[in-house]
Amino acid sequence: MLVRRLGRCGYADTLAAMKSFTDSRDAATADELWLLEHPPVFTLGLNADPTHVLAAGEIPVVKVDRGGQVTYHGPGQLVAYVLVDLGRRRLGVRALVSALERATIATLARYGIVAAADPKAPGVYVAGAKIASLGLRIRRGASYHGLALNVDLDLEPFRRINPCGLPEVRMTRLADLGVARTIDAVADDLEQELLAALG
């Protein structure tokens, strides 16, 4: 798997690049893992209810082609886009989601944080608060989109939405759990765990 560290990237350009990569890949194309941050943006999944955006203000709202409802991306959040051939890796969609959750949980365990997945609400949670969100799209047998792990981003924009369509969900971040690590340092750890989880 080819790993790309892309820094801070505009959301629309990154989405277009993921679609282009997926549409042009063939059986010989190597899988890729993209690690990056986005400027502030709210994204609405395919079947998202726009009323879950309560007060976007100056933050743009973008309709996208992943599953799930509404979420927020911004500086200080580590985003991992997973562009893999599911057939070649012998993964179903549920198995891929579970692999992403396991890799995130294992990354947090490196910092002494006990985290868990919730089969009824994809993502990763610490003491009931959500620290990582997941959303995928499968096209032509391959995945794109992925996961977003809150490192030290400003959580205020999450109060402008019902995250993942759940008014009661609380969000958290590594910085609030006593972990003072840079995005790059967390990316190093998450990369290792994702590569292990995806085989």
Image (cartoon, helix red, strand yellow):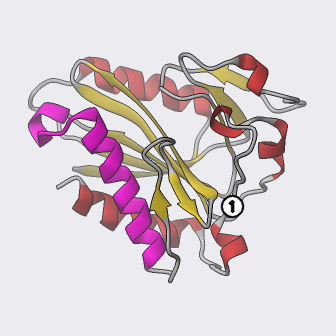
Q: Is residue 7 visible?
A: no
Front in this rendered view, residue 2 or 70: 70
Of the residues shown, which amino acid type is indicated by label 1?
Answer: Thr
- The residue lying at 72 percent from left, 72 percent from top is 176
Q: Is residue 193 left or right of residue 107?
A: left
Q: Indicate the secondary structure of the residue bearing disc 1.
A: loop
Q: Is residue 118 visible?
A: yes
Range drawn in magenta: 86-109
Query: Residue 153: x percent and y percent?
Result: 72, 58
Which residue matches tag 1? 172
**The C terminus: image quadrant:** bottom left
Q: Tell me if residue 166 is in the magenta stretch.
A: no
Q: Is residue 54 left or right of residue 166?
A: right
Query: Residue 55: x percent and y percent?
Result: 88, 29
Please tell me in which quadrant of the rendered image residue 127 appears. Answer: bottom right
- Judge whether 181 appears above or below 122 on screen: below
Query: Residue 117: x percent and y percent?
Result: 45, 55
- The residue lying at 69 percent from left, 61 percent from top is 172
